[in-house]
Amino acid sequence: MKMTCGSSETISYDVMTYGSLETIGYDVALVWLENVMLIMVISVWDVLCMLFVGHILLLLADAQVGTTKC
């Protein structure tokens, strides 16, 4: 067995370790899906955070306006 880098033996070994090429594509799709879901969760969280902070700022502004009116 030759130990040359990038030989056909290594490629077949890689395919054997990872199963078939379909599984590799499936894994990549899963990772991609997880990343997309993570980004979606983060963006939803950001929007909620911004709404929450904006609400607090509005409440503070209302309170300040109320105190200055008095």
Image: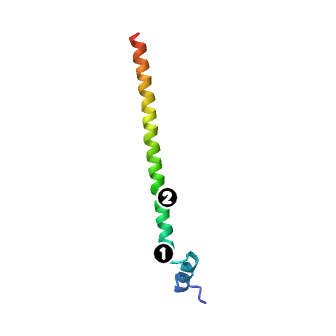
At label 2, the amino acid type is: Glu
Judge whether 31 appears above or below 2 on screen.
Answer: above
| Residue closest to the eye, 1 or 67 | 67
At label 1, the amino acid type is: Glu
Residue 46 locus on image (x, y percent): 45, 42
Query: Can you identify the residue that label 1 sits on?
Result: 22
Which residue is the extreme one toward the bottom? 1
Residue in view at x 51 percent, y 68 percent: 27
Residue 59 locus on image (x, y percent): 43, 24
Judge whether 36 appears above or below 15 on screen.
Answer: above
Residue 56 locus on image (x, y percent): 45, 28
- Indicate the quadrant where residue 51 lies: top left
Q: From the image, which quarter does the C terminus lie in?
A: top left
Q: Secondary structure at mark 2?
A: helix
Residue 5 visible? The answer is no
| Residue closest to the eye, 12 or 52 | 52
Instruction: Give whichever of discs 2 and 1 has the lower sequence position.
Output: 1
- 10 Å neighbourhood of mark 1: few (<14), some, or many (≥20)? few
Query: Can you identify the residue that label 2 sits on?
Result: 34
Residue 4 locus on image (x, y percent): 56, 85
- Indicate the quadrant where residue 9 lies: bottom right
Q: Tell me if 9 is positioned left or right of 62 in this view.
A: right
Residue in view at x 52 percent, y 85 percent: 8
